[in-house]
Amino acid sequence: MPDLANFGLKVCVIAGLVCSAPGAMADDAVRRGPDYPTVAIADYVLGCMKANQETRTVLEQCSCSIDVITTLIPYSRYEEAEAFLSLGQISGERGVIFRTSEESKAAVQDLRRAQVEAELRCF
């Protein structure tokens, strides 16, 4: 079992080094746009790594993946799809609307398309 405390520290150090490179933050802002908050990006990368492996290679692939997604859909649409996916996990009638409405299906489909494109480019 990997030491998650040390792993988290390593991720933070690596992220700090990458972001401190000249022009790195400016390039990121242009590529991603101003509307994806850092916490959403970090959350995506951590979830992606948990679903795959916690290795340096997967860190790079997951970072690439969210970078691609940010260029394909605006944050508001990403947030909407994530909310529908989360609320759709509610069991019974209460969760049905979040799984079956046209609005939820369209938002989730947009996110899935972006994720497929990201997977093709990054993994």
Image (cartoon, rainbow, N blue to C red):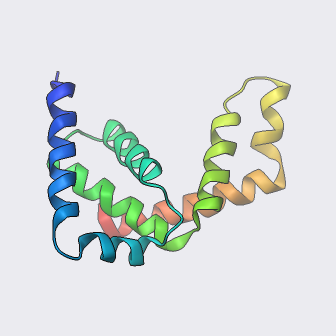
Percent from the top left, x then y, of residue 122?
31, 65
**Identity of the residue drawn at 64% across and 42% down:** 85
Q: Is residue 112 above or below residue 32?
A: above
Q: Using the image, determine if residue 68 lies above or below residue 59.
A: below
User: Residue at horizontal 50%, vertical 60%?
Assistant: 36
Nearest the eye: 24 or 107: 24
Q: Position of residue 70 (x, y in %)?
A: 48, 66
- Total tally of numbered discs in the picture: 0
On screen, 12 above or below 41? above
Using residue 82 as the reference point, say whether residue 120 is left or right of it.
Answer: left
Give the answer, above or below, for where 28 lies relative to 95. Answer: below
Residue 74 in the figure: left or right of residue 84: left
In x, y percent, where is residue 87? 70, 35
**Quadrant in which the N terminus is drawn:** top left
Image quadrant containing the C terminus: bottom left
Res. 60 image quadrant: bottom left
Front-most of residues 9 and 54: 9
User: Is residue 17 shown left or right of residue 79?
Assistant: left
Q: Residue at x 56, y 58 (%)?
A: 112
Residue at figure coordinates x 66%, y 43% from the top left: 83
Residue 55 position in % (x across, y down): 17, 43
**In this image, 6 relative to 83: left or right?**
left
